[in-house]
Amino acid sequence: MQKQVIADKICPLEYAVKAISGKWKVPIIWRINEGEKRPSEFLRGIATVDRRVLNQQLKELEEASILHKVRFDEVPPRVEYTLTPLGIQLVEVLKQLNAWGEQLLDEHQPETKSNLSAKE
């Protein structure tokens, strides 16, 4: 019954966008598609993300069932993140969005170039 109440009140598109909203979530998902990652690898690979912010974004992606966190019983402690099956599906959607973004850029580049020429 609880799921039905939630489903009646939330638009699936809004729910999906909320799951990946956040400054670093899409870059995290895009990078982890290359393979499992440790948090330090994200810090090196994603612009100037703060460790605290990164950890929060990773936690939220894990809670959304997009990432899976594996804890290793080692000293020092080590964790790695991988995509869940849901996360893998999301990457396919992001690939389509990326292709659309390339088309959008192509459409706007002539406009940008002509605006630059007009200013000269």
Image (tube, rainbow, N blue to C red):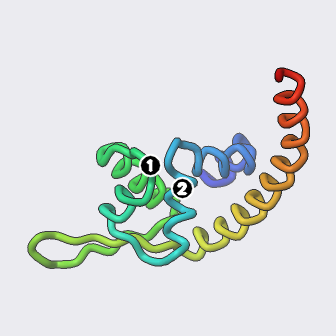
In this rendering, the label closer to the viewer, 1 or 2: 1
- Residue type, mark 2 in image: Pro
Residue 95 shown left or right of residue 23 in the figure: right
**Vertical placement of residue 76 versus 19, above or below:** below
Residue 118 at x, y = what percent? 89, 24
Q: Please give the label number shown on residue 27.
A: 2
- Residue type, mark 1 in image: Ala
- Residue drawn at 66 percent across, 47 percent down: 17
In this orientation, which residue lies closer to the viewer: 113 or 64? 113
Please, which residue is most extreme toward the front here?
Answer: 120
Residue 107 at x, y = what percent? 90, 46
The residue at which mark 1 appears reads as 47
Residue 64 at x, y = what percent? 52, 57
- Residue drawn at 55 percent across, 72 percent down: 33
- Residue drawn at 9 percent across, 74 percent down: 75
The quarter of the image holding the C terminus is: top right
